[in-house]
Image (cartoon, grey):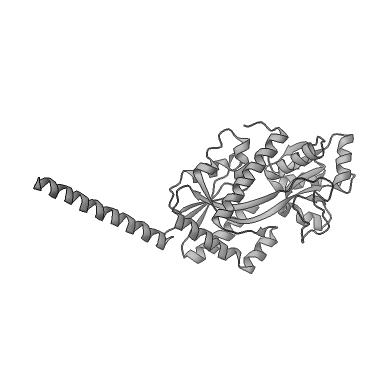
Amino acid sequence: MKNNLSKWSLIAITAFFLTSHTLHCAAQTISDFPNKQVHLVVPYAPGGPTDIIARLIGQRLAESWKQTVLIDNRPGAGGNMGTSYAAKATNDGYTILLNTSSITVNASLFNNPGYSLDKDFIGVANIASSPNIIVAGKSLQAKNLKDGIEEAKTGKLNYGSPGEGTTPHLSAEYLFKVLAKVYVEPIHYKGAGPAVNAALTGEVQFSSVAVPAASQFIKTNRLMGLAVTSSKRLPTLPDVPTVAESGFTGFEDYTWVGVFVPKSTPEKIVEKINQDIQKILDDPSFKERLATIGFDAAGGSVVQFNQYLRKETDKWAKVVREIGIPKQ
């Protein structure tokens, strides 16, 4: 009996010290975070607006953390390839995903995108947003969106998008098919640049892209800005009306960029990343830098961002359903 008590006492003491050591190490890891290189996964090719924002935020985080933040571009499958990779990463905060609003769209477009936003990720911070815009080249006779819609009713017109399933594509489909009840054929390109160029050359009559891709061409009168998908006109493009002002109410859309970590990442690490990003977003010089590429700084708490993600997921599911796009 005495030997049994000694045996169980030894086991209890060992378990206590092991548990204490584990908790101590976990606390130390969180308080020291980050103490090594951080990978910032970007599921898109280098050079686009998302990649530019990733490099801007990555540089600022590296300065704040005094650690290297490696930008890890993993493009493919509409952002699903890099996002799937990040979903399988260790949940210790050292692999961070920077993604766009497409992460809330793809659940409605793909039977198996390779991840689940709800099950695999925690939204950490909303970094920046920009509305989409409908533009037209010289091949369109109309000078505003309403007249452009009327022109589309009389003949076969088309529009360029940065790719099937992107928010500019879905915005245009919802505008033309659901709100205006007119068919305008979508022509999908590999990015906003080619979609804008198609409107410039007359290959398409309209293009739907994020504002940063088209603003310089509108300002130099090479493209007509027909309507922005925001609730108010943009200070940088004050002459471009909103979709609602153009007579088509009931839809508002933004392309946004946010940061995510794998599910079960310790709450204190999630909060630290959020707070460190918020400090960057509060810096006027960083806001000005975002503005030069057509984005507004966002921000907010972890809770606010995850509430926004749920609303965005529901919104895009409704849009996809009403447009009638089948899952891939």
Indicate the quadrant containing the N terminus: top left, top right, bottom left or bottom right: top left
Q: Is residue 305 visible?
A: yes
Indicate the quadrant containing the C terminus: top left, top right, bottom left or bottom right: top right
What x and y, as percent, mark residue 94? Answer: 45, 54
**Left or right of 307, for residue 8:** left
**Nearer to us in this view, 275 or 162:** 275
**Left or right of 197, for residue 143:** right
To which quarter of the image does residue 102 belong?
Answer: top right
For residue 108, above or below residue 243: above
For residue 119, above or below residue 295: above
Q: Residue at x 45, y 48 (%)?
A: 264
- In the displayed image of the protein, which residue is found farthest to the bottom? 284
What x and y, as percent, mark residue 141? Answer: 90, 44
**Left or right of 23, for residue 245:** right
**Nearer to us in this view, 88 or 162:** 88
What x and y, as percent, mark residue 233? Answer: 78, 57
To which quarter of the image does residue 57 belong?
Answer: bottom right
Q: How many marks?
A: 0
Q: Is residue 139 visible?
A: no
To which quarter of the image does residue 201 belong?
Answer: top right
What x and y, as percent, mark residue 64? Answer: 50, 66
**Nearer to us in this view, 234 or 231:** 231
Q: Residue at x 57, y 46 (%)?
A: 43
- In the displayed image of the protein, which residue is found farthest to the front? 1
For residue 59, above or below residue 89: below
